[in-house]
Amino acid sequence: MLATSAFPNILEAGNMGNTKLPFHADHIGSLIRPVSLSQAQKKADEGSISVADLQVVQRAAIADIVQKQLANGVRAISSGEYDRKYYFSGFFEKLAGFREVSPVPWELARVSAPPIAALKQAGQQYPMAAVCDGKIRRLESPYMDSWKMLRDTLPREKWGACKFTMPPPCYFHLRLAKGKCYSPEAYSNDGDFFADLAVAYQQEIQALYDEGLRNLQIDDPTLAYFCSDEMLAALEAEGEDPEALFTQYLQAHNDCIARRPADMHIGLHICRGNFAKSMHFSQGSYERIAARFFSTLDYDTFFLEYDDARSGGFEPLRHLPREKNVVLGVVTTKDPTLEDRDQVKQRVVEAARIVAAGQGVSLEEAMSHIGISPQCGFSSMAVGGADGMTEVKMFEKLKLVQDIARELWP
């Protein structure tokens, strides 16, 4: 096992492996992108530079942001998601059987999905989707080069402090219109589609593990959308059964991580959207989904958005099972203003009391399975980030997370 002990840090909760919480102070993954990277991405999109040229800029930007994370004591160490244009890109479109569509034409889009509905109202199309036209096969690793861009900035003994992110299996299934996610020539039903997709995930996770990855995070705003009354009503109007769809998505998640190595930590981050300029897409308490969400999913740690009233109260955390972890996103990336640390500490203790009561454990035991982080990434897209958010302010936010964690977990 690649231990995290190479980074002696009071914010570490323990060695990663199965249900251990890696860090009491964490972050979601994406970081403010340097101008040079955004410009290179734009040139690559226009065809004025090659993919290889873009990767040179990406590697340099990742090496730089890793050193800045080290200098600021930030954990986990991420690539900032500088290896991809969108937080959800780089996987599906590199599997055999998928083709990339950009932008997504309206006849392919599911207008009941909150991100599609919000963008349509704003007069924008969804930027990209991967449509399945053939049997899904993983002929090569979609993310190996991306993982190595991060991994190779550090000596081997420090790889364990890194975190890598992937999109969820249900990502495009919800965002594309019913019957448009895959062609009838490729699959006749959702079950077969998700079964083959799960095999590709299992193979990719094992390959990344074999090359040193020990901390993986799946980023899925899709599941949080099921907290939205508006989306549920719209799905029913389309003839969908929201409960059956939610059940299918939970199973798809579990199938994708079913063969993960025993000493690999896998977390799940859910939020309500973090598009360009930190646009969010839905709201609603976790209460509607919490019991099934927490009891069904096989993830070690749940990263939950809790930075404002969109997410409701902490009461749904009473359903968190023992030995599972929750990282509370109580610091926002949508506003550069720093939160009041005493108020944040009070909120975390409030959440811990609810967890403790629900599990029948002490407050101290509940706190050992809780961490804090920003509610989402700082730049989930090549062009994005909150108005007024700079790299300096970003690191001030991350330092605030660390400082609060030191006081809560001395």
Image (spheres, rainbow, N blue to C red):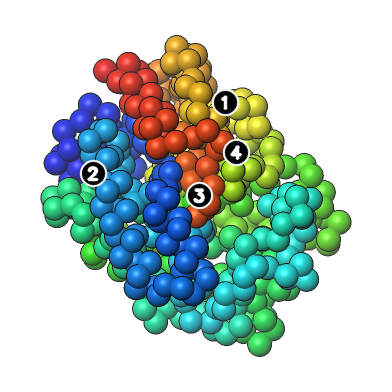
Q: Position of residue 43 (x, y in %)?
A: 47, 66
**Mark 2 to mark 3 CA distance (whole Å):** 20 Å
Residue 167 visible within the image? no
Within 10 Å of disc 3 (Cα), the crowding (few <14, some 14-19, many 20+) is many
Query: Is 137 on the left-hand or right-hand side of 114?
Result: left
Whether residues under marks 1 and 4 lie with C-beta atoms below 8 angstroms apart, the answer is no
Q: Residue at x 63, y 43 (%)?
A: 279
Whether residues under marks 2 and 3 lie with C-beta atoms below 8 angstroms apart, the answer is no
Q: Which mark is residue 380?
A: 3
Q: Could you say which is closer to the camera, residue 85 or residue 230?
A: 85
Q: Position of residue 352 (x, y in %)?
A: 46, 22
Query: Is 158 on the left-hand or right-hand side of 367?
Result: left
Q: Amino acid at mark 4?
A: Ala
Q: Residue furthest top?
A: 342
Q: Mark 1 or mark 3, which has the lower sequence index?
A: 1
Name the residue tied to disc 1. 314
Within 10 Å of disc 4 (Cα), the crowding (few <14, some 14-19, many 20+) is some
Q: Amino acid at mark 2?
A: Gln
Q: Amino acid at mark 1?
A: Phe
Name the residue tied to disc 2. 67
Q: Mark 4 or mark 3, which has the lower sequence index?
A: 4
Q: Position of residue 388 (x, y in %)?
A: 52, 33
Q: Mark 2 or mark 3, which has the lower sequence index?
A: 2
Q: Amino acid at mark 3?
A: Ser
